Image: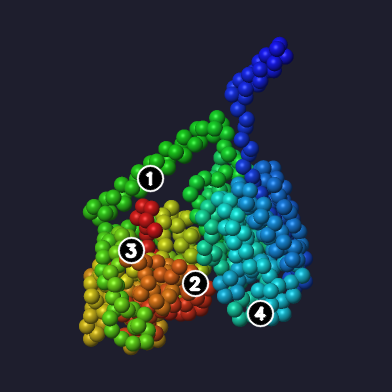
């Protein structure tokens, strides 16, 4: 009896202790796959193995379980990626880092293994690893939070040998929710291998991810700033994010960081209040905004609904049918097409074919991926949110708030020369912005001068399938829609409803430019 009572008392004491000292939850998994390839037969590199090794060491100190692979062939790369994906199914944070050669073919990114035998363009998809495989494994794992870091834009000879191969990497079209993707340089550009032990990008990343209390956005913002200084603006990293929460490589020490966090919070609140007040005043009374870095002017377009498309014509005009109602929210749209001077102020270079036209001429000869780099850097420098317009936003503004109007400014062809540069009046060249009359909303050159990129993926059946609320075009694809016509086009091809497309990575066309939207608040 005493023995039974003793056991009961012991069990009671153990239960009480468990209540007083609850078990600690197991820490969330942090798993990283780090690959460095350098001993290429066609173009060996100096630093990727060093970069991968040093990144791996840093990540281990930050609590990651690291799978480190050096100079691996295609079978080893693919097996490592599949194993990584399977292990991610346990949940937690996944991080993939690759240093080595990377390239894009037709807008698809490929990471090059050691031992790749690439004698012709068609070999690439069999001898290299599609970077989309990483994202697919992460999506299948559904672990919730993933980081992809591609220091894989180092120069190689393939872009000169093969027609469809481009330098650098292309923008990822889609990624799993909760992803953060970092390119070591702007899409379509080349990263530096470096003269020291590490590439400039890897060296900066190793330094800044050790900062306590910095969000991942702060880490990569400082990496970008450091590289811009160290490379004299030749290499500008770029990021893509679908994060909803914060991630810290090292959470901040609340006691030591409290004053800084408090100061940051006050500054953030003040900035948001100031911005909110400014935007509210625009909506209630004013209707313009000027970017503080480029002096780019924007005009407020009050949202509304309109009949998008056109009901006549054959051929290309078939893609403007049928007329259908579309609604857009309010937004700010560039008063003019982006100029060569504005592009140069942000990017440091002028890619235009018509440089002799002057800095007030529209920038042209730019791909859609070039534009994304420009937008990311302009948004970073100004602290504002910029993007390309949707097709619906572009057409709504060109048609003066959705009016039934054939060209931007008039429906009378005999008066078109007052509003647009087109084939018959340009003397075969682009012209400075703002020389013709604006439409009724104050926008210049929306018909003619240069075609303007939009953010929408192109589809021939866009008008048949798009939703009523500010449609975004097709759900997937590598073709992007152009609007407005150019100095090379006939009057029928500079109409407000005309649609055309180029591939995202196509560049060199001297009649393709852009016009930007400044977002209002958190609108898309």
Which label sits on residue 378? none
- Badge nearest the viewer, 4 or 1: 4
Residue 76: quarter of image: bottom right
Q: Which residue position is annotated with label 4?
A: 122
Dot 4: element? helix
Can I make out residue 191 in this image?
no
Residue sitting at x 73%, y 67%: 74
Residue 417 % position (x, y)? 27, 83
* Left or right, 396 with reference to 56: left
* Left or right, 263 with reference to 419: right
Q: Earlier in the sequence, mark 3 or mark 2?
A: 3
Asked if disc 4 and disc 2 are in contact, CB closer than 8 Å, the reply is no
Dot 2: element? loop
Residue sitting at x 41%, y 56%: 385
User: Between 51 and 501, which is closer to the camera in this rendering?
Assistant: 501
Q: Earlier in the sequence, mark 3 or mark 1?
A: 1
- Mark 2 nearby-residue class (10 Å; few <14, some 14–19, many ≥20): some
Q: Earlier in the sequence, mark 4 or mark 1?
A: 4
Which label sits on residue 272? 1
In 3D space, how far apart are the residues under numbered discs 3 and 1 (Cα atoms)?
Answer: 28 Å
Dot 3: element? loop
């Amino acid at each position: 009896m005493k023995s039974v009572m003793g056991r009961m008392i012991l069990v009671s004491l153990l239960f009480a202790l468990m209540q007083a000292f609850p078990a600690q939850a197991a820490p969330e998994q942090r798993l990283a796959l780090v690959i460095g390839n350098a001993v290429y037969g066609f173009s060996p590199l100096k630093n990727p193995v060093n970069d991968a090794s040093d990144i791996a060491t840093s990540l281990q100190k930050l609590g990651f379980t690291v799978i480190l692979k050096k100079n691996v062939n295609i079978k080893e790369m693919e097996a490592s990626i599949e194993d990584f994906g399977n292990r991610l199914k346990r949940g937690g944070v996944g991080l993939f880092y690759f240093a080595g050669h990377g390239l894009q073919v037709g807008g698809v990114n490929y990471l090059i293994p050691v031992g790749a035998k690439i004698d012709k363009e068609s070999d690439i998809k069999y001898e290299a690893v599609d970077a989309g495989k990483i994202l697919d494994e992460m999506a299948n794992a559904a672990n919730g939070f993933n980081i992809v870091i591609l220091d894989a834009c180092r120069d190689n000879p393939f872009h000169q040998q093969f027609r469809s191969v481009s330098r650098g990497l292309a923008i990822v079209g889609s990624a799993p929710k909760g992803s953060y993707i970092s390119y070591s340089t702007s899409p379509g550009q080349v990263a530096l291998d470096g003269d020291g032990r590490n590439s400039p990008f890897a060296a900066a990343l190793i330094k800044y991810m050790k900062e306590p209390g910095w969000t991942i956005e702060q880490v990569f913002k400082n990496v970008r700033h450091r590289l811009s200084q160290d490379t004299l603006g030749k290499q500008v990293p770029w990021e893509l994010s679908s994060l909803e929460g914060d991630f810290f490589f090292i959470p901040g020490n609340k006691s030591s960081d409290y004053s800084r966090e408090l100061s940051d919070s006050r500054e953030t609140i003040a900035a948001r209040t100031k911005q909110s007040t400014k935007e509210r005043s625009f909506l209630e009374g004013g209707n313009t905004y000027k970017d503080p870095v480029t002096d780019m002017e924007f005009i407020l377009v009050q949202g509304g609904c309109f009949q998008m498309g056109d009901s006549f014509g054959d051929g290309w005009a078939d893609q403007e049918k049928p007329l259908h109602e579309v609604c857009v929210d309010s937004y700010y749209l560039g008063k003019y097409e982006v100029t060569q001077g504005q592009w140069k102020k942000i990017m440091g270079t002028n890619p235009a074919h018509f440089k002799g036209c002057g800095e007030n001429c529209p920038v042209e000869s730019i791909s859609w991926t070039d534009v994304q780099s420009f937008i990311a850097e302009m948004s970073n420098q100004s602290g504002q949110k910029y993007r390309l317009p949707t097709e619906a936003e572009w057409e709504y503004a060109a048609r003066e708030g959705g009016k039934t109007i054939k060209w931007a400014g008039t429906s009378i062809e005999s008066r078109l020369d007052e509003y647009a540069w087109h084939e018959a009046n340009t003397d075969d060249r682009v012209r400075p912005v703002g020389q013709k009359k604006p439409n009724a909303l104050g926008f210049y050159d929306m018909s003619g001068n240069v075609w303007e990129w939009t953010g929408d993926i192109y589809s021939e059946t866009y008008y048949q399938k798009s939703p009523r609320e500010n449609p975004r075009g097709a759900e997937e694809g590598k073709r992007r829609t152009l609007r407005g016509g150019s100095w090379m086009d006939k009057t029928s091809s500079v109409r407000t409803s005309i649609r055309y497309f180029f591939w995202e990575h196509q560049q060199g066309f001297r009649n393709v430019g852009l016009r930007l939207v400044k977002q209002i608040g958190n609108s898309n």
